[in-house]
Image: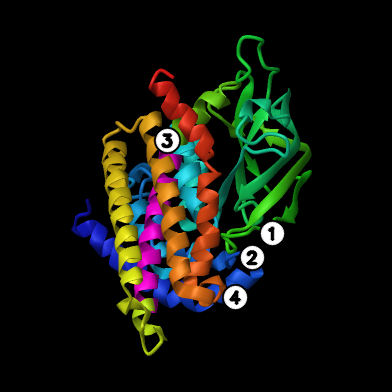
Amino acid sequence: MFNEDHEDFRRTIRAFLESEVVPNYQEWYDAGQVSRDLYKKVGDLGVFGIEVPEEYGGAGIESFKFSAVLTEECARAGVNLGGSGVHVELCLPYLLKLGTPEQLHRWMPGFISGEEMWAIAMTEPGTGSDLAGMQTTAKRDGDHYVLNGAKTFITGGVLADRVIVCARTSPPLESNRRFGISLFAVDTKSPGWAVGRKLDKLGLRTSDTAELSFTDVMVPASDLLGEENEGFTYLGQNLPQERLGIAYGAYAQAAAAIRFTQAYVEDRKVFGTTVASFQNTKFELAACQSEVDAAQAVCDRALEAHDLGELTAVDAASAKLFCTEVAGRVIDRCLQLHGGYGYMNEYPIARLYADTRVTRIYGGTSEVMKLIIAKSMGL
């Protein structure tokens, strides 16, 4: 899957995580968000600009494999980099696909450097999977839109400098509830923009997740992304990559869980011998490894298809469903092998257990993935 360029990148990321992230991670974990300076350091590594075209200051590499390597290394180290995944994996595709040359020249320098972090705001208190039911509005007023409404569960929402906000610019049509949604790249320093609660989550503790509200926020018309009223179509186009990213993260977490657990059971002694020496331990880890091998194969196939531009919405849904369910089972079994220590947050397996649970919810629930797959089967 990976060539020497990817492995060089892996070595760079591994060294960076060991020197800059792991020593500070407990402090960030307790604070509920990473240090803002971390994003600038990640930007200095060139991570945020890998897929940005050269004309806008990036490396111009059209591949998701570098993101996959970063995902693997973060899981291996038992850390995550706050909202940086949303910044690159979710927001960048919208900017590159919908942004005008003027917008990209304006936004990309800060995006690449980490000086201007991005998030995306879709979910509302009353709308989860049913995005067509959103109530946030953006009404045209001369050369501006006036934004009003609220969003929730916004990853990176506390520290974000600019957020892609989904809002209704027209009422839905009787024949098409999805019509009338538009996307705006909103400056979070705008008057009327407010960050509400930083949400207290079960897992992903270093990733700041916020409630946002907008009261007569003036958004320049020049910050509209793409065409007015076509936002729902754009949202659907990026879902395969988003779900691939979640699938790959779940696989990487499961693989890391086995690594952490093997090290633990080889060291931990009960009844005068190591936990690893018991047949049950061997059988459990062997079964977990077989599931992770299968998940890796699914991810590899999806990753290759994505880089070739051939990853379908159904295949991405299938990969996400399978890999997230595998991760849930594997990490649960690995935690059990830790005994009581597996329930302590000081051990990475406990944090993985909490972190991985949301992968079956965000980016489309497992139930929604099953609906997509069933529909493709003609059911």
> How many residues crowd mark 4 within 10 Å: few (<14), some (14–19), many (20+)?
some
Asked whether the beta carbons under mark 1 and mark 2 sit within 8 Å of each other, the answer is: yes
* Magenta span: 240-264
> Disc 3 on helix, strand or loop?
helix
Of badges 1 and 2, nearer the viewer stands: 1
* Residue carrying label 2: 32
Is 52 positioned to the left or the right of 367 in the image? left
Residue 205 in percent (x, y) is at 60, 63
Sequence-earlier tag: 4 or 2: 4
* Residue carrying label 1: 200
Residue 214 in percent (x, y) is at 76, 40
Q: Quadrant of the C terminus?
A: top left
Sequence-earlier tag: 4 or 3: 4
Sequence-earlier tag: 4 or 1: 4
Q: What residue type is labelled 1?
A: Asp
Q: Which residue is drawn at 79% across and 43% down?
A: 192
Q: Kindly give the residue lying farthest to the left in the view shown.
A: 4
Task: State the separation of the CA atoms marked 4 and 2.
Answer: 9 Å
Task: State the separation of the CA atoms marked 1 and 2.
Answer: 8 Å
Q: Which amino acid does label 3 sit on?
A: Ala
* Residue carrying label 3: 317
Q: Which amino acid does label 2 sit on?
A: Gly
> How many residues crowd mark 1 within 10 Å: few (<14), some (14–19), many (20+)?
few
Is 224 positioned to the left or the right of 70 in the image? right
Residue 212, magenta (yes or no)? no
